[in-house]
Image (spheres, rainbow, N blue to C red):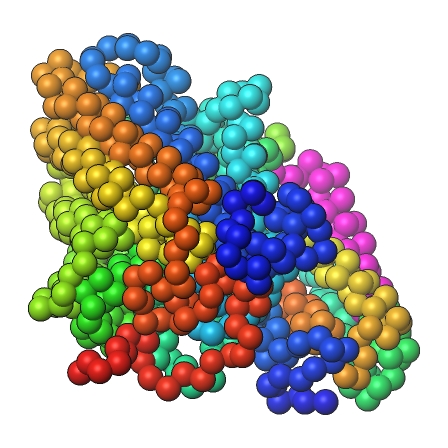
Amino acid sequence: MNSGQPAEAPQSFYYNTGKYRGVLSWVLSTDHKRIGILYLLSVGAFFLTGVTLGLLMRLELIAPGKTVVNASTYDSLFTLHGIIMIFFFIIPGIPASLGNFFLPLMIGARDVAFPRLNLLSWWFYIVAGFLALATVVMPGGPPDVGWTFYPPYSIRTTTSVSLAAFAAFVVGFSSILTGLNFITTIHRLRAPGMGWLRMPLFPWALYATSWVQVLATPVLAITVLLLILERSFGVGFFDPVKGGDPLMFQHLFWIYSHPAVYIMILPAMGIISEVIPVFSRKAVFGYKAIVISTMAIGVVGYLVWGHHMFTTGMSEEAQLVFSLITFIVAVPSGIKVFNWVSTMYRGSIVMAPPMLFSLAFIFLFSIGGLTGLVNASVAANVHIHDTYFIVAHFHYVMFGGTGFAFFAGLHYWFPKMFGRIYNVRAALIACVVMFIGFNLLYFPLFILGWNGMPRRYYDYLPLYQPLNVLSTIGSWVLAAGILVVVINLVRGAFRGDPAGSNPWDGTTLEWQVPTPPPAENFDVIPEITHGPYHREGKAQ
Amino acid sequence: MNTSGGEITVHDKHVDYSGAKMGMWLFLFTELIFFGGMFLLYAVYRSSFPEEFYSTSAELHRTIGAVNTVVLITSSLTMACSITAVKKGDTRLSALFQLLTILFALTFLVVKYFEWEAKIGHGIYPGSEALTAQGQGKIIFYSLYFVMTGIHGVHVLAGIAVISVTMAMTLKNRINKGDYIRLENTGLYWHFVDIIWVYLFPLLYLIG
Ligand code: HEM
């Protein structure tokens, strides 16, 4: 790690190792910037693991019948892929890595409110990660229940479901601690003069996300805990034989897991709201509308979980209500897309990598969001339930949305984090390759799903083969793009050209401190006298 | 000393009282929702098996439950006293009250242990043959009973551990008149654990 220290900034936090030396100066550090980088590396490692599993699955699906893995291995593959991608990549991804690093910088604070809890949360994350991976070598074999852990199968199977569920429990703690920390930080540590409506939009997004994390994650914790008790002691809450109801598990699970979708998407929207004004050289259009829609998504997102269960025999009234609310929750997201586009309108757009990733985000996320509306209407839902249409939809939202936003944010803040800049041309090319690969990989899945190909099988009818081949080829293109990104960034961190303190001409606070930031961020805490996107000499 | 919140500096350290309290309240929200999941299951299953819930509830020992309720509420009182004591600068008295709190908590657990023991002695515990042979409502009621009181008991244990730490810190004067936020937060947690019991007691023991 230390060899990556940029030579030009002796006061930078890379030189302030604190009490410890070497690796310990990282894994025991309470500096939010070091923890942010720890998270970035760990989240990145899990992402690449998940991608590898995904590629394996796509390879299996290149032809009907058994190709490279058998049915039960395939079950484990999609379960591990799902668990890793959801609990270890996409939920902690943006808040814990980029959020940790930049939240205090953007609101003018020296650190988060509880630095030691922050470190503890990373440790929980790592322990949980090892537990999840350990399922592979456990006697029962890796879990084969899907990332949703639905009983009654998850109670009966002999694979190591309990361990995987426990990993989800522990990583939930990590998530709660991060949320709790960020809420307190935002309430207590904003720089003087930074009223709520002078706070940049990324911190706003983190604020809404943190509330969802704090209020929804405990439901997951108790749900998986009960599942573990059910498996170990046979308590029977979800077991029809003992009077329990498996549907109660689904309700509890989605009470968490649907809000969790907003834990995934809100920070992504926050990043886009930062990037677009900077590279359009304009103040963001409709700042307040974005703030309000951010909070609205946070609130309404709680009330829609039932749309995952339309086919479970819930009452028609319940279906109607859940369907309606689900349509409503799309409105604030739509508002944001309009705001971003209006920000670009008549701006002088600079097509740097963060901007290109953001545009890809808007495109892919819109497809994901609009196909979500198809799912939201009960009639269509029954037709496409548990088909590849769903697989395509959530990859568009989570990967095309949050994943691409993560890359946008990474390319945007990279120079500030590492003091160096990657090869811009390579980054632009990688983004285009990823974009093409992504659509090749997932678009055919919409069609396959619409035509009835069910998800979670290692096999399919021969008539589905052509589109499956296309999709698998897409997965290789996408992987090539990701590979270029990784190589380019790693190389950039060690050998890139030095980046000045404000390479993109950003207006928010993090660009006003030296690069990389000094250990305590600000020598003097700044006084805030205007909104975050104010540009000198420009009409607002 | 600044009790209304805001920032003060103690031992050259930056301490944000309001921040620390806010963090604790947020944590308690998460705890509340955590238990909320179980209360939700309780509500649903009680409405599915009302009769069996009433009749099974009558099998629990009300007097013991009532005694435990009194014990736990008294422990909340001693906890509150310990905070008042430290605010007045009497750290020894505060530590004494914390010790009392721990003793009450232990009493609660011991009583609980004998209650469980009696049920398990009769072959009634989740997954047991005797219980599985019973009606579904009864199985679910006992499952709820064991899981809810069990998880509550774990919280009591955690409380004992944390109060032991604050007691040691109070004796070493690391919790004192000028800096007692840790004790105050521990108190908040402890009252929360009590309140959960105040709901568990009627819902489990008194509906029969
Ligand atoms: C190169 C990247 C990726 C590839 C090739 C890929 C491929 C796949 C495949 C083939 C499936 C299984 C479909 C089925 O049989 O039902 C799947 C499921 C899934 N993927 Fe991905 N994926 C990738 C990236 C991601 C990312 C970035 C995320 C999350 C952010 C993600 C989340 C999921 C989830 C949650 C499931 C469902 C697992 C389950 O059914 O339990 N994937 N993916």
Residue sitting at 56 percent across and 34 percent down?
A: A130
Quarter of the image for the C terminus of chain B: give it: bottom right
Residue nearest the observer in this picture, B186 or A307 = B186
**Residue A17 % position (x, y):** 65, 54
* A225 on left or right of A451: right
Quarter of the image for the N terminus of chain B: give it: bottom right
Residue sitting at 31 percent across and 80 percent down?
A: A531
Q: Image height check: is B168 above or below B140?
A: below
Q: Image height check: is A530 above or below B103?
A: below
Q: Main secondary structure of the magenta part?
A: helix
**Residue A54 % position (x, y):** 33, 28
* B29 on left or right of A428: right
Residue sitting at 22 percent across and 82 percent down?
A: A537
**Residue A75 % position (x, y):** 37, 23
* A39 on left or right of A269: right
Residue nearest the observer in this picture, A142 or A199 = A199
Residue A48 in view in this figure: yes
Residue sitting at 18 percent across and 58 percent down?
A: A350
Q: Quadrant for residue B77, please give it.
A: bottom right
The mark total stands at: 0
Q: Image height check: is A438 above or below A77?
A: below
Residue B111 in view in this figure: no
Q: Quadrant for residue A313, please give it.
A: top left
Q: Which residues lie in the magenta part?
A: B101-126
> Is residue A478 rendered magenta in the image?
no
**Residue A4 % position (x, y):** 52, 45
Q: Quadrant of ligand 1?
A: top left
